[in-house]
């Protein structure tokens, strides 16, 4: 039996932090799982954005009706811009909340994947926010082509995160 070294660095006993003790052992999610994540999360964010848009439209319509004023073409244009901005906001809140709290979005629960730092640890708020904002880069979805079936997209590489298999 070896004596414990009192000068050794402390080791983590939390299995949630030590997902992969060796960076090379990260089990990167496959291209198929990543594509399914894109589709499922797209459905969820579109539904949430649609619900938020309906609520805003109803509130605005009711307030205009209470004033006895009709909705003008300018109001319609304003509501379209507000709806678009709300869609962005819903997507940001959805991904930041779910990936920060659970390390996975709804789709990642379904596919058995999780977001981690490049070293396998839990990502920081800044990494999750950067990852989410990078999704808005035009043609970002095409960054997943290649990688021999185990891709790392721009929103992964720019934020220093990876999506790994958990089962």
Image (cartoon, helix red, strand yellow):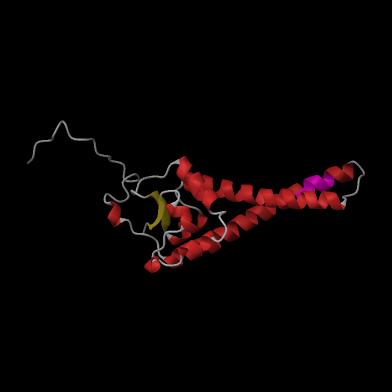
**In which quadrant will I find the C terminus?**
bottom left
- For the point 47% across and 56% down, the residue is 154
In percent of width and height, residue 11 lies at 24, 39
Would you say the magenta stretch is mainly helix, strand or loop?
helix
Q: Is residue 1 left or right of residue 126?
A: left
Front-most of residues 160 and 4: 160
Q: Is residue 78 left or right of residue 143?
A: right
- For the point 45% across and 51% down, the residue is 158
- Number of marks: 0
Q: Is residue 67 left or right of residue 157?
A: right
**In which quadrant will I find the N terminus?**
top left
123 in relation to 43, above or below: above
Q: Say whether residue 60 is magenta.
A: yes
Q: Say whether residue 89 is magenta.
A: no
Which residue ends up furthest to the left in the rendered image? 1
In percent of width and height, residue 51 lies at 68, 53
Q: Is residue 24 left or right of residue 86?
A: left
Image quadrant assignment for residue 124: top left
Which residue ends up furthest to the top in the rendered image? 6
Front-most of residues 167 and 163: 163
- For the point 41% across and 49% down, the residue is 160
12 in relation to 148, above or below: above
For the magenta stretch, what is the residue range?
57-62
94 in relation to 33, above or below: above
In percent of width and height, residue 13 lies at 27, 40
- For the point 45% across and 45% down, the residue is 127
In percent of width and height, residue 90 lies at 62, 49
């Amino acid at each position: 039996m070896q004596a414990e070294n009192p000068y050794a660095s402390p080791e983590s006993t939390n299995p949630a932090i030590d997902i992969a003790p060796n960076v090379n052992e990260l089990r990167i999610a496959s291209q198929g799982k990543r594509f399914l994540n894109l589709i499922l999360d797209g459905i969820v964010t579109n539904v949430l954005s649609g619900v938020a848009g309906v609520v805003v439209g109803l509130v605005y319509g009711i307030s205009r009706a209470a004033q006895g004023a009709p909705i003008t073409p300018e109001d319609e244009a304003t509501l379209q811009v507000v709806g678009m901005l709300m869609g962005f906001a819903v997507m940001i809140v959805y991904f930041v909340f779910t990936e920060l709290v659970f390390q996975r979005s709804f789709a990642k629960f379904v596919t058995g994947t999780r977001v981690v730092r490049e070293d396998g640890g839990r990502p920081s708020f800044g990494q999750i926010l950067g990852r989410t904002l990078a999704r808005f880069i035009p043609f970002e979805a095409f960054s997943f082509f290649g990688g021999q079936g185990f891709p790392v997209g721009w929103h992964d590489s720019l934020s220093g995160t990876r999506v790994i298999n958990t089962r």
